[in-house]
């Protein structure tokens, strides 16, 4: 009882840095092979190997993520300014789409109670205007958010260093505390690390590739906000069965409805044959068929994780699902056959 109480108290204490701890563990798991290779080249230099690996983490992941975030904020601010100034006018685009709608579609909209296009345009304009008002008020929180971000980043990097340097000892301690036979403990840890590494590596790399491909397609076609669209497609690529189509299909449909047939058709072809196919081609190579979880489990875990934990749930959900499957695989293999 005392062990449970103290553990819960420590978890409550570390709660504000849960995201930093999560990403520190992920970085240590993903970059552990590099740290091991450096240790083989310099035996007995654990501090040097961990520090070098940490520099690689900063160069490969942290700095690009910060540059992307800065560019994303800049483009988001420019987009908000264009909406406020009227340069981007959804109401005018809606009116253009209305002119290109077939009579049958117009009749269907009338049956749904959406036949008054002027009223619908007015509602869209009011909704966009009201959604922009809170953004100005939140501008005062940027300094506080930046301080919290860099504090969490420091905690993450600090933790990553020690996880890389002392990872084997930490794993041995955790393994010794598991209430399982020794062979099952070792198998559980090995299986869990394998599935987590494959799942996270596959999800993150596929998200980056699909976001990059989709963003380049938007930029090539001259669609404004290409960076925003690319990041959105990268995020939605984490959802199986939904994926990047949640972004490029409505945009392509909007272009077609507003009479921009060439760009709408080109975006549909690129999205269907290139962006969506990245997942089918790249993920099996990175994850492998043995470690890959079924899409329905990934979808439930991702949606549930996002609902409960926000952005970090994109990672925590699949990780919990991976642990769930690893435990049940060990339980199945441990049962005596009849």
Image (cartoon, rainbow, N blue to C red):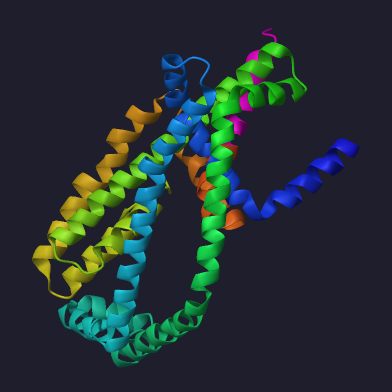
In this rendering, position of residue 192 left or right of residue 273: right
What residue occupies the far right of the structure in this picture? Answer: 1
Residue 189, above or below 225: above
**In front: 254, or 61?**
61
Q: Give percent across and percent down for residue 38.
A: 43, 21
- Res. 316 visible in picture: no
What residue occupies the far left of the structure in this picture? Answer: 262
Q: Quadrant of residue 94?
A: bottom left
In this rendering, position of residue 125 left or right of residue 93: right
**In front: 170, or 101?**
170
Q: Give percent across and percent down for residue 279.
A: 32, 40
Q: Give percent across and percent down for residue 307.
A: 57, 57
**In front: 197, or 108?**
197
- Res. 211 visible in picture: yes
Q: Residue at x 40, y 29 (%)?
A: 287
In this rendering, position of residue 247 left or right of residue 294: left
Q: Residue at x 64, y 24 (%)?
A: 171
Q: Residue at x 34, y 56 (%)?
A: 67
Magenta region: which residues? 321-338
What secondary structure is the magenta-colored segment mainly?
helix
Q: Residue at x 78, y 22 (%)?
A: 179
Residue 171, above or below 224: above
Quadrant in which the C terminus appears: top right
Query: Any magenta on residue 241?
Result: no
Residue 30, above or below 268: above
């Amino acid at each position: 009882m005392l062990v449970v109480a103290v553990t819960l108290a420590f978890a409550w204490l570390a709660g504000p840095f849960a995201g930093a701890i999560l990403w520190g563990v992920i970085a240590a798991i993903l970059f552990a092979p590099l740290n091991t290779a450096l240790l083989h080249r310099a035996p007995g230099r654990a501090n040097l190997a961990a520090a070098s690996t940490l520099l690689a983490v900063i160069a490969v992941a942290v700095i690009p993520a910060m540059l992307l975030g800065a560019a994303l904020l800049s483009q988001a601010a420019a987009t908000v300014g264009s909406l406020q100034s009227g340069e981007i006018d959804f109401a005018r685009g809606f009116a253009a789409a209305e002119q290109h709608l077939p009579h049958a579609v117009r009749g269907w909209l009338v049956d749904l109670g959406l036949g008054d296009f002027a009223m619908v345009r007015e509602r869209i304009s009011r909704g966009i205007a009201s959604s922009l008002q809170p953004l100005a008020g939140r501008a005062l929180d940027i300094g506080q958010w930046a301080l919290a971000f860099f504090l969490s980043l420091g905690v993450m990097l600090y933790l990553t260093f020690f996880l890389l340097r002392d990872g084997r000892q930490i794993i041995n301690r955790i393994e010794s505390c598991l209430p399982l036979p020794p062979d099952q403990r070792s198998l559980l840890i090995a299986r869990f690390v394998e599935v987590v590494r494959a799942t996270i590596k596959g999800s993150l790399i596929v998200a980056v590739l699909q976001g990059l491909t989709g963003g380049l397609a938007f930029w090539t076609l001259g669609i404004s906000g290409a960076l925003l669209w690319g990041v959105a497609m990268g995020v939605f690529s984490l959802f199986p069965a939904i994926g990047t189509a949640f972004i490029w299909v409505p945009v392509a449909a909007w272009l077609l409805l507003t009479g921009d047939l060439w760009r709408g058709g080109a975006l549909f072809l690129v999205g269907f044959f290139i962006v969506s196919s990245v997942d089918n081609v790249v993920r099996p190579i990175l994850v492998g068929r043995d470690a890959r979880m079924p899409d329905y489990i990934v979808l439930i875990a991702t949606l549930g994780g996002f609902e409960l934990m926000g952005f970090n749930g994109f990672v925590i959900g699949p990780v919990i699902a991976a642990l769930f499957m690893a435990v049940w695989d060990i339980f199945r293999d441990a049962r005596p056959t009849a």
